[in-house]
């Protein structure tokens, strides 16, 4: 009886909603209803309504969006007899319906995400044997040394922990290559890394051939190890000391658990953050996924493996013969296979690793192209909606994650749609200016408010649009390619140890300047048509405003592809660690202020700075986490600055033995709380109004900066610097 009553209630609610969205009302009533709902949503937000009030606000916004969809579907499409209008008009309609569909999936996934889980450090009941896999392809020795040392230093019994370097850059296939340079490089790498692993107490493993890319490399590791659990870290993802303590305990709770995933935290900004200088002021792009979306997926038992910073059950992996390798995104594909077999996953929303992300815009696009192609391969080969074994919520969650990567199509359509009217006078959206105000503008505003409700401090207004635009220009061909030939894409390692030491335009920046020029011409055309055709002024004003919005985003993108030079090749991390600075047999009390992979900045008390010279050898003495006695890390002085009784000394690490790499890793990676503190410090919700004003200011400045870079590159004799090329005065980095 209760079930029948519930069905009846839902039927009545559905009928009321359908009546509401299809109710024929005049334009004035529509405007009043839109303004009222926007005001109510804003009031709930101002009063910080949570729980049921959050759902009420989202429901009010959904009503406006559904009314827009009904109006858009029944009143605005051009007649099919006018193909020149109907075809682009229908493509625009499909783009909008895709956006509405993705919003609907987002509401399902993240309207009420799980709260962050509490720490598990003190609750570990058993200590299963753990194999730590660090798959590598072409990363250099110093990067690998830091990651391996950090993994080896995790707070876990040494007899229950085995760290493996899975080296795919020195396979027998490469060492025996007919290309002599490739063979010699592989032989040298093989010897160097094998020696490094011996010094660090890490197992070194390679294989005969590079088959099935990263999935094949991980499966080779599974074949040679026997731990109950497997932790996976990318070569540039170093774990904190408490990583295993915070994760392995969940396997005690659930015998059907196959995955504990943690977020990816990055030490360096992505190209957008670096070139717009927002890294320390605004949440990173990945925080929306790891801070909100993964928690939403976790609610439905659909949090998936992200390739690194995770612990997996060997028993579960045996059911799928290891990691799946049909697509080039083996992580998500493996998760789908195991979820479909009834295994469960857990997401721990605490950054427990620190890694690197692509430094150049070209590498950033290459990484995103691989993600997009891999997720579309999963959609093609696994099709989650009909995947047997998945629950209905899991199917919807995986559809949301895979369908998202079609965004280049609607984003491109939204970009070019105004041009059909401004350049060719095509009527692809049949509506008056008043109807646009009552329906479309209300829809856009409510959409932004709902996004603000869903993602709040994790995503500022207009930033998603900017990220999608800068990716769409180059992802569109990649997505089309994988749709036409889903087996064509191959796994490509993302370069993450690059640096841009000289300011330059990205080598793939040209399309952005072409698009900006076209949109600017369209702006001039809209101004001309507004005055020349006063009888169409309302439509021209609306379309011209749309084009202006596109122009603002395209102008901001010019700053994204104008790569800023960096004085240091690696990112500095703020720490506050007591130490002694030792030179010439004298010890001085000091505090380590910041560190990078290459060096540190130390505030030293009482030292005579006149006696501290460039290239002087010294030692930083400190107590590592989990240790009782201080240890010494050799450094070389790179610069000296005086501040009263304190002297700031920039040092470069000069590790001589494996233990020194462990001490560097201890300084940078051991304390996971510093990552959480950093993230919290840059989270703030500016709101739609102030967020929009902030974005306009940033876009104006970045447009001018991008045009200046273009003019400089066009000067006679100008040369475009390549990624990683050093500029004047940067030989021998100093951490300042």
Image: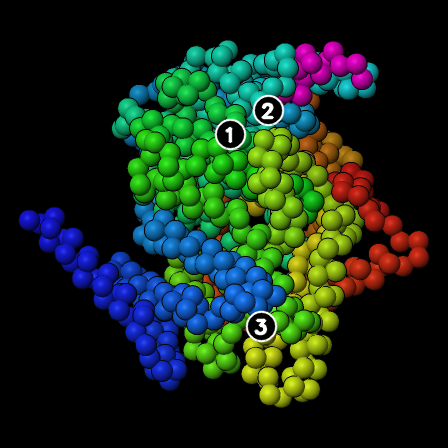
Q: Does 432 sit above or below residue 238?
A: below
Q: Which residues are magenta?
A: 167-179
Labels 2 and 1 touching (C-beta < 8 A)? yes
* Near-viewer residue (622 or 400): 400
Q: Does 291 sit above or below residue 201?
A: below
Q: Is residue 428 left or right of residue 718?
A: left
Which mark is drawn over residue 213? 2
Q: Does 448 sit above or below residue 177?
A: below
Q: State the separation of the CA atoms marked 2 and 1.
A: 9 Å
Q: Is residue 682 left or right of residue 521?
A: left
Q: Which residue is mark 1?
A: 330
Q: Residue at x 66, y 48 (%)?
A: 474
Q: State the separation of the CA atoms marked 3 and 1.
A: 45 Å
Q: Is residue 647 visible?
A: no
* Near-viewer residue (528 or 286): 528
What is the number of callouts on the image? 3
User: Badge 3 local density, few (<14 within 10 Å), some, or many (20+)?
Assistant: many
- State the predominant SS element of the stretch in magenta: loop
Q: Does 645 sit above or below residue 710?
A: above
Disc 3, SS: loop
Q: Residue at x 18, y 62 (%)?
A: 12
Question: Sequence-wise, which precedes: disc 3 or disc 1?
Answer: 1
**Farthest-out residue, right:** 716
């Amino acid at each position: 009886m209760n079930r029948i009553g519930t069905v009846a209630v839902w039927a009545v609610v559905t009928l009321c909603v359908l009546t509401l969205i299809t109710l024929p009302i005049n334009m004035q009533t529509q405007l009043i209803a839109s303004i009222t709902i926007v005001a109510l949503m804003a009031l709930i937000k101002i009063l910080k309504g949570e729980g049921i009030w959050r759902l009420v606000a989202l429901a009010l916004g959904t009503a406006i969006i559904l009314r827009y969809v009904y109006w858009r579907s029944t009143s605005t499409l051009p007649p099919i007899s006018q193909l020149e209008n109907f075809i682009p008009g229908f493509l625009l309609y499909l783009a909008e319906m895709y956006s509405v569909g993705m919003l609907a999936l987002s509401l399902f996934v993240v309207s009420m995400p799980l709260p962050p889980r509490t720490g598990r450090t003190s609750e570990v009941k058993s200590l299963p044997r753990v194999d730590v896999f660090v798959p590598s392809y072409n990363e250099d020795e110093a990067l690998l040394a830091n990651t391996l040392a950090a993994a080896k230093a995790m707070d876990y019994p040494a007899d229950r922990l085995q760290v493996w370097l899975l080296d795919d850059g020195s396979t027998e296939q490469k060492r025996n290559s007919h290309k002599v340079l490739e063979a010699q490089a592989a032989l040298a790498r093989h010897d160097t890394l094998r020696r490094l692993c011996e010094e660090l107490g890490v197992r070194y493993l390679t294989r005969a051939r590079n088959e099935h890319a990263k999935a094949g490399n991980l499966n080779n590791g599974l074949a040679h190890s026997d731990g109950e659990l497997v932790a996976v870290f990318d070569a540039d993802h170093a774990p904190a000391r408490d990583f295993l303590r915070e994760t392995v305990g969940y396997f005690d709770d659930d015998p059907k658990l196959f995955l504990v995933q943690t977020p990816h935290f990055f030490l360096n900004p992505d190209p957008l953050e670096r070139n717009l200088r927002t890294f320390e002021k605004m949440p990173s792009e990945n925080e929306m996924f790891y801070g909100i979306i993964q928690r939403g997926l976790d609610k439905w038992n659909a949090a998936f493996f992200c390739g690194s910073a995770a612990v997996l059950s060997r028993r579960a992996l045996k059911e799928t013969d290891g990691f799946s390798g049909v697509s080039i995104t083996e992580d998500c594909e493996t998760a789908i296979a195991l979820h479909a077999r009834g295994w469960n996953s857990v997401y721990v929303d605490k950054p427990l690793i620190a890694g690197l992300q692509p430094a150049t815009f070209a590498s950033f696009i290459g990484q995103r192209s691989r993600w997009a192609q891999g997720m579309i391969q999963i959609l093609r080969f696994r099709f989650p909606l009909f995947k047997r074994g998945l629950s209905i919520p899991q199917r919807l969650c995986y559809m949301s994650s895979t369908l998202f990567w079609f965004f280049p199509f609607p984003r491109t359509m939204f970009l070019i749609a105004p041009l059909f009217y401004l350049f060719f006078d095509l009527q692809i959206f049949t509506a008056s200016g008043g109807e646009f105000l009552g329906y479309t503008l209300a829809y856009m505003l409510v959409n932004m408010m709902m996004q603000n409700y869903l993602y709040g401090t994790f995503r500022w207004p207009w930033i998603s649009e900017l990220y999608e635009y800068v990716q769409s220009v180059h992802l569109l061909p990649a997505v089309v390619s994988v749709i036409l030939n889903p087996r064509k894409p191959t796994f490509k390692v993302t370069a993450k140890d690059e640096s841009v030491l000289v300011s330059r335009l990205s080598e793939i920046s040209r399309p952005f300047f072409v698009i900006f020029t076209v949109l600017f011409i369209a702006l001039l055309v809209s101004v001309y048509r507004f005055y020349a055709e006063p009888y169409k002024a309302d439509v021209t004003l609306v379309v011209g405003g749309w084009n202006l919005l596109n122009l603002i985003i395209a102008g901001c993108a010019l700053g994204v592809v104008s790569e800023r030079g960096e004085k240091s090749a690696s990112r500095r991390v703020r720490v506050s660690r007591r130490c002694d600075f030792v030179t010439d047999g004298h010890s001085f009390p000091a505090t380590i202020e910041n560190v990078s992979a290459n060096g540190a900045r130390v505030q030293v008390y009482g030292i005579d700075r006149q006696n501290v010279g460039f290239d002087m050898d010294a030692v930083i003495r400190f107590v590592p986490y989990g240790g009782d006695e201080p240890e010494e890390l050799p450094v070389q002085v790179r610069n000296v600055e005086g501040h009263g009784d304190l002297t700031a000394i920039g040092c470069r690490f000069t590790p001589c033995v494996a233990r020194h790499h462990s001490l560097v890793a201890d300084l940078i990676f051991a304390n996971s709380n510093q990552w959480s503190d950093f993230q919290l410090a840059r989270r703030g919700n500016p709101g739609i109004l102030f967020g929009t004003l902030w974005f306009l200011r940033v876009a104006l400045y970045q447009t001018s900066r991008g045009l200046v870079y273009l003019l400089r590159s066009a000067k006679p004799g100008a040369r475009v610097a390549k990624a990683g090329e050093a500029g004047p005065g940067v030989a021998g980095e100093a951490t300042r």
